[in-house]
Image: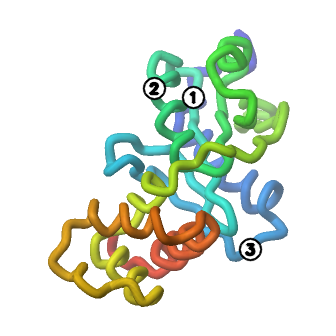
């Protein structure tokens, strides 16, 4: 049996291994990073498996041996609107197919079994996405959070009764991407009871 085809390796096993990989390796030097499972993007239309939020937003899409890559083209198109960096974490048997499906700036991490445990190997790191859409990044904010950000920037006049989409548009138009990133990290870090 091929190392990555072990029937005991499920998505949860890969997710647990990925959390360790992020905390002890990739983001070891950024202990204040917020790691979130199943983060909804594009108004909840898509859920990235794991997101890391610090000075950048880095998404990780898991494709375990029991998955397939059928949804990957649509996922990559939408994740590319929101995340500064993106990586696919896939079973070894999907690596060659994934290379043809993901943009060049996405990172590629293979997962196999080593000593009975999921083993992650970063084939190449993710690079900066230069096409982040500020409006789609603002969609990570709940309505009251968007209103708070407007207040914090002296822009809340006339917005109290407006829809969240109206607020997202205003934030995306008036704030630069770094300010939006900071606001998203601050608001997501302070959320309680949202899981």
Q: Is residue 62 left or right of residue 25?
A: left
* Quarter containing the C terminus: bottom left
Q: Quadrant of residue 104?
A: top right
Observer-nearest residue: 22 or 39? 39
Kindly report which numbered mark, 2 or 3, lies closer to the viewer in this rendering.
Answer: 2
Q: Measured along the vertical axis of the image, is residue 186 above or below residue 151?
A: above
Q: Residue at x 68, y 44 (%)?
A: 129
Decide if residue 71 is in sight here: yes
Q: Which mark is residue 74?
A: 2
Residue lying furthest left: 161
The answer for how far apart the CA atoms under marks 3 and 1 are is 26 Å
Element carrying mark 3: loop
Q: What residue sits 53% from the left and 36% below the top?
A: 11
Q: Judging from the image, what secondary structure is the residue with disc 1 in? A: strand
In the rendered view of the protein, which quadrant contains the N terminus? top right
Foreground mark, 2 or 1? Answer: 2
Q: Which residue is mark 1?
A: 63
Coordinates of residue 76 in the picture (x, y in percent):
54, 31
Work out whether 41 lies above or below 156.
above
Identity of the residue drawn at 39% across and 67% down: 141
Q: Residues within 10 Å of mark 1 (few under 14, many from 20)?
A: many
Earlier residue among tags 3 and 1 = 3
Residue 120 location, x and y as percent?
A: 77, 38
Q: Residues within 10 Å of mark 2 (few under 14, many from 20)?
A: few
Mark 2 secondary-structure assignment: helix
* Between discs 2 and 1, the one toward the N terminus: 1
The one nearer the camera, 79 or 152, is: 152
**Residue 26 vertical placement versus 77 (above, below):** below
| Residue 71 % position (x, y) | 45, 22
Real-space CA distance between mark 2 and mark 1, rounded to the nearest whole angstrom? 14 Å
Residue at 32 percent of width and 85 percent of height: 156
Instruction: Tell me where residue 125 appears, x and y as whole percent.
Output: 81, 41
């Amino acid at each position: 049996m091929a190392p990555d085809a072990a029937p005991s390796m499920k998505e949860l096993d890969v997710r647990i291994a990925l959390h360790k990989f992020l905390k002890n390796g990739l983001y070891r030097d950024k202990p204040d990073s917020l790691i979130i499972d199943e983060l909804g993007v594009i108004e909840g239309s898509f859920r990235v498996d794991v997101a890391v939020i610090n000075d950048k937003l880095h998404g990780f899409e898991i494709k375990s041996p029991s998955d397939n890559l059928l949804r990957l083209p649509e996922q990559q198109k939408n994740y590319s609107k929101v995340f500064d960096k993106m990586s696919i974490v896939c079973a070894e048997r999907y690596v060659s197919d994934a290379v043809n499906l993901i943009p060049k700036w996405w990172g590629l991490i293979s997962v196999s079994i080593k000593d009975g445990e999921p083993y992650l190997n970063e084939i190449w790191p993710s690079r900066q996405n230069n096409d982040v859409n500020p409006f789609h990044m603002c969609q990570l904010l709940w309505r009251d959070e968007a209103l708070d950000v407007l207040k914090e920037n002296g822009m809340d006049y006339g917005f109290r009764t407006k829809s969240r989409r109206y607020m997202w548009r205003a934030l995306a138009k008036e704030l630069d991407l770094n300010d939006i990133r900071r606001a998203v990290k601050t608001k997501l870090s302070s959320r309680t009871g949202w899981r």
